[in-house]
Image: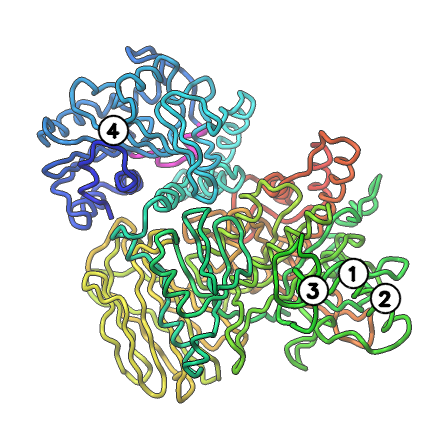
Amino acid sequence: MVDADSLGQNVFAWNTALSLALSSDLAYQPPQAVINVVERNWRLDKCVFLEESDTECFVAGTNAAILVAFRGTESLNDWLADLDVRPTDKPYGRVHRGFVDAYEVVAPKLVDAIAAFQPALKTIHFTGHSLGGALATIAACELRDRFPIAAVYTFGQPRLGDRTTAEFIGAHYAGRFHRFVFDDDVVTRIPPGYRHVGRLLHFDSDGFLQQAVPEGGDGTTELPELSELQFKILKETAQSIRIEARIAVGPTEAAAELSDRSIEGLFPSVRDHRMSNYLFAIRNQIPRATEHLQEAVVFRSIELEAATMSIDEPRAAQEKFPVQVRVRDRQWRPPASADVTSKIGPIYSLQATKHDIATMQHDPLIFSLELGRDMDFPHTQECAVSVPFVKGDVVHSGNPGERGDQAIVALIDSGIDILHESFLDAGGMSRIEAVWVQRDNSGRTPRQVDPNAFQQDFGTLYTAQDIQTFVNNDLVVGNNTTPAVLRDPGPSVAQDHGHGTHVASIAAGRAVGTFAGGMAPESRIVVVVPHMKTTPPDPPSLGYSNSHQAALEFLMAYKKVRGLPMAVNVSLGMNAGAHDGMSTLEKAFDSITLKGKERGFIIVKSAGNERGHAGHAQLQASVAGVLTIQWDSRNVDRNQDYLEFWYDKDDDLTFNLVDPSGARSLPVKHALGDHIRSFSNKGNDMHLNLTVHHTDNDDNLLTVRIVPVQNRIQAGIWTLEVLADSLGPKNGIVNGWVERNDDRPVRFLPANSSDDMTLSIPGTADTVVSVAATNTSTPLRLQARSSLGPTRKDGPKPDLSAPGDGITAARSNSVDHAAVVPLSGTSMAAPHVTGALALVLSARHKKEKADPNKRQFNAVNLAGMLKRSAMNYNKLHNKAYGYGSLNAAAFFAEADLV
């Protein structure tokens, strides 16, 4: 919420920056929605919305301050397509003509509106995002002599003037013009031929402030302008996308939305332009003691109590629990008694006691704190067909042929059967270099194996020497010495195929027996088996987030020690989270690759197999009366049901939970300050926890946790009643997800369920390549369970598709060490892409060794080439197929030309 007092300050303050960033974000909404939020939610005295032609802004005020916020372009893609570079001469310099024209159409009304607020003794701030920032700058130049403008704060504004303009701003707004840039925001690099003005505050991809640059200075953190050629390519792509979108859905608002989503997926620097990134980075600068951020602390005390319910008090005091902590200061240090399992950028994965967690809850240097969650391995249902279908065989047999020998395929999965012959080379030597089993404490930890390379001090790391010894003993001599954890046994007799083994063979298996071979059959292989599940009476596991963060840190360290590029395949996901790329886990996946800039390292994630499982619900709340989200609970054993319901920060909603017997909770309501409700009935404990202004994304989150205490979780229909007390511009849209497990005992009723936005996390992270599953014939058909995008914020996911229907590949834990099994799902699609990446990375590694100027690709380069080379690529993003289906030969050919 806007801090009205901060608008009255005449000096720079982060609270003021946040209030103006929220105002710039709100300016994109319809007029009445803007007025309602400003006057009802923010409780400013008055708001006037101005609209002339395509220029919009609003003026709001209190008895001490006036705020003017300009809206950015309605469609970024359309703006990029139409942007020209014509200048015009003004008293304050040679400036972009289009920006001046856009300001001038609203200028008379703006002057009258500001005057009506009696500005003589008030503090006035101008602000805007994108084009809105440019308009705020022009307005500040034009109205300098008319009104006492205290300061200008802009976010992601384009270049607009010349040296004279920069000097004008420096002379008249010295120390009062603050221009914010997030990471590589492409809009701040255009149009070419113009300069920036004011003081630069540049955030890196983790939201940390880099060196601030004085007015008009081209400092070390100023992003370079696009070249004329780069600008031309950007414009032509935007124009082509607009044409294709209008052909696909007509010249409608839907076409503009499709265009914006599509351009974001093709130019990663467009993602950095999101206003949500600026809000996140600015909040990161504000101590959590600030009231509106204090509400956003993610501290799940209920979850912690549930986790220790069956543990005696002396033991509970020493018990350690998985925690993810995102910090706002790089100098932060964890409590002495907490164990650091991994650290990626500003994100720590810890094992901490209840006392540690209580202490960290009040630490002002912590941005967010989340307890880890349990997660089950998924169970899914002929490489001889699929590899040729994506033209992997063309790459193998090319001149010269490439089979991936100078790259590593890494997997975070259920394991790998080291005795399966598809993982041996032609001489009988294992290509598996390392297997880290996080839940196995029988051997040496990674740190004990190599303290100079690895920090992880749990689990067992089986080295290449260990693995070859087992292979020799069992396959050559005939002994039975290989530990069960290295045979990838299935979770039951009925499901003994070994998920990780099957996936690994698609990506990196060699042809053996009836198995036709995978995508990169000579690549090196590294596997991490995460510890994600709590099984009583075991203590809580590392949880999905913590185990995967530790796995990524280990794999990055291994890649650097080994000196080879690495493609990482992740076929395990989770449902809980806002599905918008902003969670701590998603940020960790982005941070490990330096937001896709780390050379020779890329992560691939299966889109998920959630379509048709009724695990996502959507509701539009109403002020007219109660509406309901309902789910059916099956009569099966499980430890808990966990559901999340996300909605917009400006919506004020009230919730009641009703169990199948009719027992009701008391209402959970933001306005009442009643954020936590618990009640018991029929041997179940039910907990509702409302977090407003969540630290991940500033939106609101209701969690529902149902725990069996004496009896199973009640079977039947559960009901969440939803009533809107007031609605913001998003009109009360609530999205809910249920965290899945193997039995899928919970399904939303058809009236509420939706297959859209069913991608599993972390496939929604910006720099992770998310892969949907199809058949292996044309026309393509989506595999029955393949999850659909987009993200909750309309982000372009999945990225592409690949074969995942009835893929025959290696079967684990069999007496036949060349056994195969057919399986289906996005878990089978993702390794086709991972293997294709290994082929390109391997070829590039050889080129770089011969010519240092041929530098290795990073994830941004690789993802762009994957999309552009895909079959059926037309620049438009599709929520089912992404940008098209994998074409390994075209991908390899495009990379070979760079």
Q: Which residue is mark 4?
A: 151
Q: CA distance from mark 4 to mark 3?
A: 57 Å
Residue 632 higher or lower than 693, as above or below: below
Q: Which mark is residue 513?
A: 2
For label 2, the SS is: loop
Q: Which corner quadrant holds the C terminus?
A: top right
The residue located at (52%, 39%) in the rendering is 268
Q: Residue 519's x, y, as percent? A: 75, 53
Q: CA distance from mark 4 to mark 2?
A: 73 Å
Q: Amino acid at mark 1?
A: Ala
Please tell me whether residue 845 belongs to the stretch shown in magenta.
no
Q: Earlier in the sequence, mark 4 or mark 3?
A: 4
Q: Which residue is mark 3?
A: 461
The residue located at (16%, 34%) in the rendering is 66
Image-quadrant location for residue 661: bottom left
Q: Which residue is mark 1?
A: 464
Q: Are marks 2 and 3 in contact (CB under 8 Å)?
A: no
Q: Is residue 873 visible?
A: no
- Specify few, some or many for label 2: CA neighbours under 10 Å numbering under 14, 14-19, or 20 or more: some
Q: Is residue 587 left or right of residue 105?
A: right
For label 1, the SS is: helix
Q: Are marks 4 and 3 in contact (CB under 8 Å)?
A: no
Q: Earlier in the sequence, mark 1 or mark 2?
A: 1
Nearest to viewer (mark 4 / mark 2)? 4
Nearest the eye: 485 or 251: 485
Q: Amino acid at mark 3?
A: Leu
The residue located at (54%, 75%) in the rendering is 742
Q: CA distance from mark 3 to mark 1?
A: 10 Å
Bounds of the magenta span? 71-81
Q: Are marks 4 and 2 in contact (CB under 8 Å)?
A: no
